[in-house]
Image (cartoon, rainbow, N blue to C red):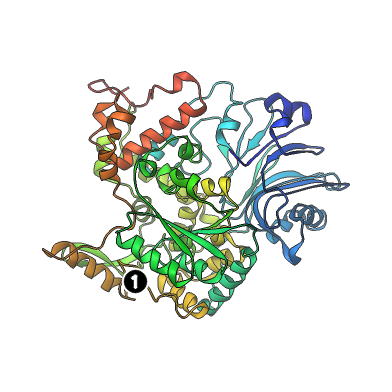
């Protein structure tokens, strides 16, 4: 990877057992921690920073802003830690991991940002606690890596491995809003729901403007991954020096045409990347960013990286999650046999059912897939029990069932590989993780975290933000959009709304990926493309770095063999 953090709770000799210091741009030697960083943009304001002084040492990896615009965020954190302890972490803003080793306070830890937007993997298997941002690099220190059965099943059925698990039994990752010490994992309280009544629209507008200003000063040529939807357009509106926007899609597709109109409205060049094999095929450029726990499917742009000629890349990832209630359970009505959301929340939601739907669980496909796996596990029972257990882990952070659903979804967000890939190749602001915006999410009652609230806030910032509406949402009312979409699908000679993303099934067939990716497992060819891509993801991730015996997919049984 282009950017990496790797460290040990131990001295330089322990560090050198696992990695050479020559692999990193800088290595910090503390009394308890030795940690290396590789980052071509180390020291850029708003980005990775290091500091060593009499107090100890500190490293922050990723995007970070601190109060008073201190030019060295690592120095600021270490100095604040001397007086405020771990409460100082509340002053950090961005998408980051922070490592602190304090001589005076005798403390050493690795901390996530409040929503774990960047993963930290660790293991004690090698006789020392080893940690890092690259799961493969940390996994290589395992003496005898063993696949984690439940992790694998979660990934195959849900598209995401939940909680602290990874693909291997002795490799873990930090949970949401936590820190790692030499002997323990400590939960923090920066991400706790405390809803209250306030002017949610004005507050969201003000906080969005400040968050955008905070991130507008990153250097170089600026670009934006632009959809025709609601989320990324506010960035295009407010960051005035964005030169180039990019959309994945056929130039004649409604999504691409609408994105091009948006780019023209704000004087940005627009490029559409033709969906082809580069979009659909999971190779090293994608799978390494999944860490073996999430789908490469979400990294839509990976195959086109060499054609993106910018230094700083913006995106609107997770706007729907934090501001528009993606994980809240909506009330629905029956319209000609289809359940259509009304725009109101469900008064008595079933959290397991809601999360199964949000994660995209498909019962019929999972039953078919289960017959192909070397595990005697009922998928329906398994996914329900594993989500129920995960919901219990967030109970102390929430005040209601609706917020429990949201918290569990955020803690296990499937689409984070999208940002992981971008931030390894560009300076990448993650606007949704702004501390003020996260605070807005935590304080806003779930019934007010809606698309309507978000659009009102955006229109207060820019009254012309909806000059070009998303092609599949011609009306303000959710119910009207859903009804028109249904009528279009059912009415002969009336064109349906086009989906925003390319057709996976068509691309999988067009590029003969059954033969090219899964020729030795013909019996899985009947599965949908998404599930075949999950199989290929985990296979590719293992082949990229692991031992040869892992590559035969022992968990995927040959046709006509018995279940073990």
Q: Is residue 490 above or below residue 294?
A: below
Q: Is residue 75 left or right of residue 313?
A: right
Q: Is residue 542 left or right of residue 331?
A: right
Q: Is residue 467 visible?
A: yes
Occupied quadrant, residue 350: bottom left
**Residue drawn at 37 percent across, 26 percent down:** 555
Picture coordinates of residue 224, whole percent (x, y): 50, 59
Towards the viewer: 454 or 384: 454
Q: Is residue 33 left or right of residue 285?
A: right
Occupied quadrant, residue 18: top right
The quarter of the rendered structure image containing the C terminus is top left
Furthest residue in direction left, as rendered: 492
Q: Is residue 557 above or below residue 47?
A: above
Total labels drawn: 1
Q: Is residue 318 above or below residue 2?
A: below
Which element is circle 1 on? strand
Occupied quadrant, residue 540: top left
Q: Is residue 380 visible?
A: no
Picture coordinates of residue 155, whole percent (x, y): 41, 39
The quarter of the rendered structure image containing the N terminus is top right
Identify the residue position indicated by label 1 in the image: 343
Picture coordinates of residue 388, whole percent (x, y): 42, 48
Q: Counting other residues with Cα less than 10 Å from the Cα at mark 1, is it few (<14), some (14-19), or many (20 or more)?
A: some
Picture coordinates of residue 469, whole percent (x, y): 36, 72
Towards the viewer: 551 or 555: 551
Towards the viewer: 517 or 105: 517
């Amino acid at each position: 990877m282009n950017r990496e953090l790797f460290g040990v709770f131990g001295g330089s000799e322990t560090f050198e057992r696992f990695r050479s210091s020559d692999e990193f741009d800088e290595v910090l030697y503390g009394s308890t921690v030795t940690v290396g960083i590789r980052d071509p943009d180390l020291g850029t304001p708003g980005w990775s920073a290091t500091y060593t002084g009499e107090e100890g040492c500190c490293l922050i990896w990723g995007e970070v802003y601190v109060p008073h615009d201190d030019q060295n965020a690592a120095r600021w954190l270490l100095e604040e830690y001397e007086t405020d302890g771990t409460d100082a972490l509340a002053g950090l803003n961005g998408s980051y991991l922070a490592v602190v080793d304090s001589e005076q306070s005798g403390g050493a830890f690795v901390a996530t940002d409040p929503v774990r937007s960047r993963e930290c993997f660790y293991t004690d298997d090698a006789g020392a606690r080893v940690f890092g941002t690259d799961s493969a690099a940390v996994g290589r220190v395992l003496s005898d890596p063993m696949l984690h059965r439940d992790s694998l099943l979660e990934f195959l059925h849900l598209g995401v491995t939940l909680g602290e698990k990874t693909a291997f039994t002795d490799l873990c990752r930090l949970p949401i809003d936590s820190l790692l010490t030499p002997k323990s994992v400590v939960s923090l309280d920066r991400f706790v729901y405390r809803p209250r009544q306030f002017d949610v629209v004005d507050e969201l507008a003000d906080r969005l403007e400040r968050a955008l200003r905070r991130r507008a000063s990153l250097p170089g040529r600026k670009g934006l991954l632009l959809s025709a939807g609601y989320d990324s357009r506010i960035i295009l509106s407010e960051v005035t020096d964005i030169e180039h926007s990019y959309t994945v899609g056929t130039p004649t597709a409604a999504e691409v045409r609408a994105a091009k109109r948006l780019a023209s409205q704000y004087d940005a060049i627009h490029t559409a990347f033709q969906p082809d094999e580069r979009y659909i095929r999971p190779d090293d450029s994608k799978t390494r960013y999944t860490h073996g726990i999430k789908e490469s499917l979400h990294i839509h742009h990976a195959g086109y990286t060499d054609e993106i000629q910018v230094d700083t890349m913006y995106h609107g990832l997770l706007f729907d999650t934090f501001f528009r209630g993606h994980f809240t359970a909506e009330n629905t009505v029956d319209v000609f046999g289809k359940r259509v959301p009304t725009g109101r929340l469900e008064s008595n939601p079933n959290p397991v059912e809601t999360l199964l739907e949000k994660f995209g669980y498909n019962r019929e496909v999972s039953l078919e897939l289960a017959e192909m796996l070397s595990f005697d596990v009922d998928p329906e029972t398994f996914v329900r029990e594993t989500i129920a257990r995960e919901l219990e882990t967030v109970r102390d952070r929430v005040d209601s069932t609706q917020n429990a659903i949201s918290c569990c979804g955020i803690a296990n967000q499937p689409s984070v590989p999208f940002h992981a890939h971008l931030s390894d190749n560009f300076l990448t602001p993650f606007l949704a993780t702004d501390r003020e915006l996260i605070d807005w999410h935590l304080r806003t009652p779930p019934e007010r975290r809606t698309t309507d609230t978000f659009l009102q806030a955006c229109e207060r910032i820019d009254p012309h933000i909806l000059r070009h509406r998303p092609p599949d949402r011609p009306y303000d009312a959710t119910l009207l959009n859903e009804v028109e979409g249904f009528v279009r699908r059912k009415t002969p000679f009336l064109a349906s709304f086009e989906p925003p993303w390319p057709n996976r099934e068509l691309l999988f067939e067009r590029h003969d990926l059954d033969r090219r990716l899964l020729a030795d497992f013909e019996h899985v060819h009947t599965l949908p493309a998404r599930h075949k891509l999950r199989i290929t993801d985990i296979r590719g991730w293992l082949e990229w770095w692991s031992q040869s015996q892992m590559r035969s997919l022992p968990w995927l049984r040959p046709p006509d063999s018995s279940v073990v």
